[in-house]
Each structure stands twice: as structure tokens, then as C-alpha cells.
Image (tube, coloured by chain):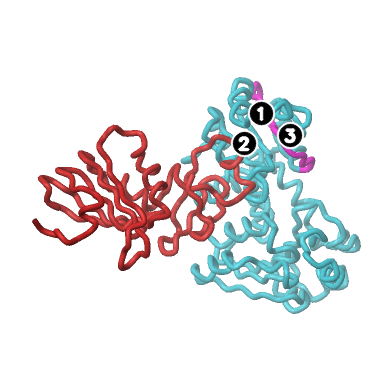
Chain colours: A red, B cyan
Amino acid sequence: MKNANDPKQLLVSAIESGTVIDHIPAKTLFKVIKILGLDRISNQITFGTNLDSKTDGKKAIIKIAGVFFEDDDINRIALVAPNAKLNIIRDYEVVEKRVVSVPDTITAIAKCMNPKCITNFEKVTTRFRVVSKKPVALKCHYCEKITYQERLEII
Amino acid sequence: MKTRSLVSIDDLTTAEITKILDLAAEFEKEPIQDILRGRVVATLFFEPSTRTRLSFESAVNKLGGKVIGFTDSSSSSVTKGETLNDTIRTVNNYADLIVMRHPIEGSARYASEISTVPVINAGDGANQHPTQTLLDLYSILKTQGTLDKLNICMVGDLKYGRTVHSLLMAMSRWKTSFNFVAPEELMMPDEYKLYLRNLGLNYFETSNLAEVINMADIIYMTRVQRERFSDPMEYEKVKNAYVLHENMLGETKPGMKILHPLPRVNEINTDVDANAKAYYFEQALNGVFTRQAIITTLLGLK
């Protein structure tokens, strides 16, 4: 059995087919779950968090059985997990690896940092144009103010 | 027009701006017409702005339309807790066009997305006020005969001044060179200077008006407000440095005009009013023609 000595294999079991999202910062795991709507689906999901990572400090990993994401959907997590890596699994084998990239527009994920913006007063779905991807800077579709990465809040 | 509402000056292409300015000139020749007969315009002023509201109402009345609305939110259902969404949906039943002033930024964009009739943004907090920008453009075009390659000197509060930011963005389409005259604390924000640099346009910053006044085709004055200063001493030091007096105009260009979005407090001394270079009251009149052009364009009547 390969990777018999890898402790991660003991913590989170393998899936037959589906998606594994790795290299999620441990502190944003639940945001990723929420953004992808994983708290609302009935598929089998296992996750591990506060795992040691050589590159990211503490990381989290999610394995979702029977779900394959479109790029547009998965890129929504780029704001909170910019280094996330996807492994697409079929028949217990990794058939494809993908990385996430920040999309050009962000809808219904981020909060506008401008306290005087309409989106912070009424039930308006937030919309931003991404004016810079690294570091992330978002221009609000409504108040036209810029929300920078360090002040970014996920709804 | 690709959009029926006017929320931000950036919503308009240069060709659309030119068309509105041409139309404003037509209305200036013939301001009283019957184009809006039977039409109702709602002026929803969630915060008071007498000057802007009167200008819009004058524009509508001269074209035979009727105006309904409120002049500040304390006299409307907003005080009962109604959402903007509900107000707009309700007013949609009564009016052919909505003119809205609202203290919350982005409220006009939001209203334009809900509304079934055109929405004109008459100011959404510190964000946009595109009809002011269009009337400024009209005033510049009318007095200079062109918008191309002019020298515009902006004076006063360049940090928070919504009108100067919008005017800068709009004028940059015509290769303007800018002089920015402001106290240290109220200088033009970096994002606008970066915008000009990216377009390859020249600008010069100074805190001394005398240094650049004679180069100007247009002097755009704004008010330096006491409440903008973190240190009141700083305000006391600079408050008189940005006041225009008649005796400063002697060497300025013959065709130079002085603009101001009004209301003026003391930043233009009243001795300037009689000078032929003072243009701020005519500028306000131009607002009526410009708004006539905007309203009839959005309603598809012109």
C-alpha cells in the first residue's frame, strides 16, 4: 500500500471518486465550506484541519465524494484559500490536479469595507470587480470604493 | 444610450457625453418647450440639496412636465423604516423618471437596478454626482469653445471633493493638463494622480495659487471646510491661502473663467463677482439646460 507511512492517510480516508481540496489555511476552512455550500449538500464529506504543512503552517484538507467543481465555482474560494490545490479523484486515482485563481468578478462572497455603502444597509448582494489579484483589491459595483486584501471580510 | 439610467459619469461614452452637451446647447437656445407634457418626474431627496433639486425642477417645469417628490427623508415613509427597495418600487408606479439624492454610497446604482424607469443620480454620499460633472463640462465647452487640451486649475479641497474627482476623470478624456492647488492635508488622492499618469497626462501640484493661476483656462474653486482638518490650527493657517480675490486676476488669460459648484462661502471674495471672468452663476444656469438634455435623452425623447 502506497503512502503507508504518511500519517495524513490515517487521519482522512481516501475517496473513490470526487474532489480533494488541499492546502486550505486552517483558519479559513469553515469559510471555504460555506462558500462552496458544502454545509448544504448530502454528499459524504470528510475534512481534517490543523494539519501540519511544510509550506502553509497549519492547513486543512477537504474530501468530497461524488462532487466535481466547475472552475467558476471553485475560484470563489481563491479569496480565502489562494494556494488551494484540487485533486480530482476517479477510481481512487488522481486523474487531474488544479489550482485556484482569483476571478475577475466576485459576487456574494465579500463584504464592502465602506461603512457608508448601500450593501451594508440593505439586503443587496455584494458585487466587486477585481482590480488587483495580488494582493487582492476589489472595487465595489455600488459605492465604487476599493476593498483591499487586509480589510477583506467574507460574508 | 446603452444604459437608461445615469448613475456615474463613467457610464457614458465620450460620444454620449458630446451628444448630451450638444443637446444642452439646443435647450439653451429654446429652454421652454412642451416635450415633457404629461410626464411626471419624481425628485426623491433623502437628504436636502436645495440647489440641485431646484435646478432639476426648473428643467422639468420649463419642458411642460410635472414634478412630485419629497425634499428630505424626514417627511417621507423612510422615517417609518421603509427600505430604499420598497420606496423605488412604489414610486415606479407614479413617475416616468426618478431623480434621487441619497446619503448612502451606491444607493443610486442599486436603485437603477430595481427601478423600471430611468434613475438619475443627483448625488449618492461622497460617491458620484454626474449631472454636476456634465454641467461643468458644458460650462467649460461653452466658454472655451472646446474641451481639448485645456489647462484646468483645481483649488481647495481636492481630497474629499467629489466634484473635482468626477471632473478630473471626465476631462482626462480630452488631454487636459491639471494644476492642483491645495493645502498639504487636502491634496489630490494618489489614485487620481495614478490615473492621470497611466493616461500620460501632465499634472502639477502646489500649495501656492499664484504660481499657476496665469496658466489656467479654467479655475475650478472648491470650499476648504474646517471639519476636514484633524488639527484646527492647521485650518487657521491655510484658510486664507485658498481664497480668490479680484486683484489676483490681472495677469490671467483673457478667456479664463472661474467655476465653482456652489454654494460658495468665502473662498471667492465677492469683489470677483463683477469681473467678466467670474462664471459660477452662469454655470448654475447651464445646469438647467444640461439637465433638460439628460432627462429627455434618458426618456428617449431626444
Q: Residue at x 67, y 53 (%)?
A: B136
Q: Residues within 10 Å of mark 3 (few under 14, many from 20)?
A: many
Compare residues A78 and B39 and report the one nearer the observer.
A78
Q: Which mark is residue B73?
A: none
Helix, strand or loop at label 2? It is helix
Left or right side of B4 for A35: left
Q: Is residue B263 above or below residue B66?
A: below
Q: Which mark is residue B295?
A: 2
Residue A52: name its quadrant: bottom left
Q: Tell me the residue that label 3 is attached to.
A: B57
Q: Chain of mark 1?
A: B
- Picture coordinates of residue A144 (x, y %)? 55, 51
Q: Which mark is residue B41?
A: 1
Q: Is residue B7 above or below residue B254?
A: above
Q: In the rendered structure, which amino acid carries the disc numbered 2? A: Ile
Q: Do the residues under discs 1 and 2 have CB atoms within 8 angstroms?
A: yes
Name of the residue lying farthest toward the bottom: B211
Q: State the extent of the magenta-drawn residues as a range.
A: B33-51
Instruction: Mark 1 or mark 2: name the one nearer the start of the chain.
Output: 1
